[in-house]
Image (cartoon, rainbow, N blue to C red):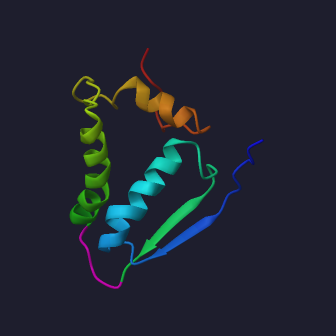
Amino acid sequence: MSETPRPADLIVFGGTGDLSMRKLLPALYHADRDGRPAPETRTIAMSRGGLDEVEAAWRWIDPILGERDSRGTPPEPYPAGSAGPASAYELVGRRGRAWHEEVPV
C-alpha cells in the first residue's frame, strides 16, 4: 500500500548551481509529474550569486526540454495567442489544481 504524500516546504541552498540544475530540479520535475510530492508542497531555491530572471528561467527549463527531446516527444501544437494546449489543463487538473482561466470548448 502506498502512503499519501504529505505537504512540505523544500528549501534548496544553491538553487542556481550546477548540481541543482542538472540533478535536483529535473528530479523534482519528475516527482511532480508522477504525483509526488503533495500538491501543497512548496519549493524555495536560494543562491548567493545573482541570476537575472531570463537566465534563471532558461537554466530551469533547459533540463526539462532536454528530457523531452531525449524521449522524442514533440511539443503539442496549439493556436497562437491561446493559453496553450488542452492537455496542460488536464495535467494540472490531475493534481487538483487549475489555471486562472477556463479552457475554451
In the depicted structure, whether residue 21 falls above or below residue 5 = below
In the depicted structure, whether residue 24 falls above or below residue 78 = below
The region drawn magenta spans 48-52
Residue drawn where x is 29% and y is 71% of the image = 18
- For the residue pair 65 and 71, the one nearer the viewer reads as 71
Q: Tell me where residue 91 appears, x and y as whole percent.
A: 49, 33
In the depicted structure, whether residue 12 falls above or below residue 59 = below
Give the position of the N terminus as an image quadrant. top right
Residue 45 drawn in magenta: no
In the depicted structure, whether residue 67 falls above or below residue 22 = above
Residue drawn where x is 30% and y is 28% of the image = 82
Q: Characterize the magenta stretch by its predominant secondary structure.
A: loop
Instruction: Give residue 6's quadrant in the image.
Output: bottom right
Count up the numbered dots: 0
Of all residues, the one furthest to the right in this rendering is: 1
- For the residue pair 68 and 52, the one nearer the viewer reads as 68
Q: Tell me where residue 11 appears, x and y as whole percent.
A: 53, 73
Of all residues, the one furthest to the top in this rendering is: 105
Q: In the shown orientation, is residue 102 left or right of residue 9? A: left
Give the position of the C terminus as an image quadrant. top left
Residue drawn where x is 42% and y is 26% of the image = 87
Q: In the shown orientation, is residue 58 left or right of residue 13? A: left
Of all residues, the one furthest to the bottom in this rendering is: 48
Q: In the shown orientation, is residue 95 left or right of residue 2? A: left
Residue drawn where x is 47% and y is 56% of the image = 28
